[in-house]
Image: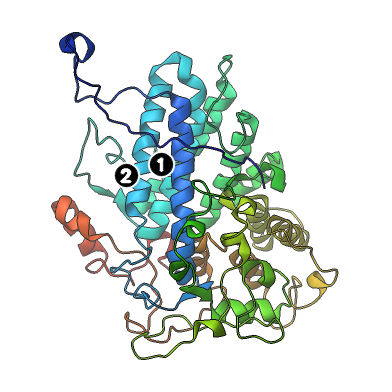
Amino acid sequence: MKNTIYTILILSLSFFTACTTDFEEKNTNPNAPVSVQPGLLLRQAIYDFGEQMSYEGFAAGDLLSQHRTALDFNLFDRHALKSPQLGGNPWPIFYTNLRDNELLLKQAQEVETFKVYEGPALILKAYMAQGLTDLFGDVPYFEAFNGIDGTVAAPYDAQEDIYLAEGGILDNLDQGIAAINAYSGAVALEGDLFFDGDLSKWVQFANSLKLKALMRISSQEDVAAAIASIYAEGNFISTNADNAVFDFTSSAPNSFRFAQLRAGDFNNFVLSETMEDILTDLNDDRISVFFRPFANSTSGEFNGLINGIDASQTSIEPANYSLAGTLFRENTAQLDANFMTAWETHFILAEAAEKGFISADAESLYNQGVQLAFEYWLTDLPADYLTGAAAYNAAGTTPLQQIITQKWIANLINGYEGWIEWRRTGFPEFRAVAASLNDGIIPVRMPYPAEEQALNADNYQAAAAATNDNSLNSPVWWDND
């Protein structure tokens, strides 16, 4: 894990200078945003999104994906997703950072000196837009990111268009790669927390994101040729040294946020029964990195709790359940904010090979993905791991189940991704939560937040009507069989 951050300056995109005697000369338009250097905008967009979504991934995403269980303040864990508590409201994180990134993109497209930022800004826009629409479905997009001088109450765009139309996810990835390949200036890319200004690695990042986006929509679109073309070119993230990640630090202010919170908040999240059973059945040593033996254990055992208990009706002794590992509190300098990795890329390619989209050995790609995931999570791969229950063709499973289960395990802290992939594939098998507040149904989308109903009422009403009154059980376009 790399790219340690020492100090992050939180930018204010609008501020006023102090009053002076020559106010009119120095402050011709005090309500306009002060121009911010693009390197600071890039750094801010990467860091703020990564830091906030890592917190969200732990506190809410990992509940939806059944990596963790919440002991209390757990309405979200019981699938009352319209009642976020310690986490569960990623909407403003996406829109704040997409709007900041739009400022960067405009600077890059309008000022020749800043042209080097155009490709990375387009790639980041595609990355964040995919995360947004995969969670919520149709969302304000094409008119949504110009709040300073554009539409505030933006219409909701169809997920299909957000993926496929000009200016959408796949187009922006192509345009981002083209902008980088066309750049011949001498200005260096600053503020790059991923790759320290190496534009060639941004192209690898974009190609891995294209593979991810194409696989995500593969039930609706014929993506085989596009995936095969990327694979044949071979210019994607293939080693952990090339991952699009940045490190947290070991102490505030840039340590993982749960390391900075009070013990009670950290101790509220424990190993889920689903995660325990899967890791135990696979004899997976990563359990000791992800979690701690429960406090009342006398022999270093791990113990998980079923998701979604009714805390008011169920007496729980926290010392009987496994807390998150030291990586998430005492040793956060070893923890990444994870955008895209070599292991995820290899699991996507393994699935593509298994489905016949590419001519490649699916088992070999799967094995490489597992090896990279163990390396990423600082765990030695046992010599017999890939010949036992985790083997590609292990009895009682299917290759697709093995691929997605391994991707799900490694997506700990990126829990929303685990839930999204479960929605797409049905793997791994989730348990019914103990005290569901959604009629026993595992949700298949995040609900639009209440503030949309208040601030964007007309457009919200149309979007709510298209999702059965903003239902958690209304599948998104790529999940609609």
SS of the residue at dot 1? loop
> Mark 2: which amino acid?
Tyr
Residue 313 % position (x, y)? 35, 91
Residue sitting nearer the eye, 7 or 412: 7
Q: Residue at x 40, y 75 (%)?
A: 77
Q: In the visual, does 390 lie left or right of 261?
A: right
Q: Which residue is label 1 attached to?
A: 168
Residue 98 % position (x, y)? 37, 41
- Colour scheme of the rendered structure: rainbow
SS of the residue at dot 2? loop
Q: In the visual, does 129 lie left or right of 225?
A: left
Q: Residue at x 62, y 64 (%)?
A: 326
Q: Quadrant of residue 96?
A: top left
Disc 1 crowd, CA 10 A, few/some/many (<14, 14-19, 20+): many
Q: Earlier in the sequence, mark 1 or mark 2?
A: 2
Query: Which quadrant, please, contains the C terminus?
Result: bottom left
Label 1 and label 2: CA atoms lie apart by: 9 Å
- Label ID, residue 141: 2
Residue sitting nearer the eye, 161 or 389: 389
Residue 171 visible, this orientation: no
Residue 142 % position (x, y)? 31, 40
Residue sitting nearer the eye, 481 or 320: 320
Disc 2 crowd, CA 10 A, few/some/many (<14, 14-19, 20+): many
Q: Residue at x 51, y 50 (%)?
A: 213
Mark 1 and mark 2 residues within 8 Å of each other at the beta carbon: yes
> Mark 1: which amino acid?
Gly
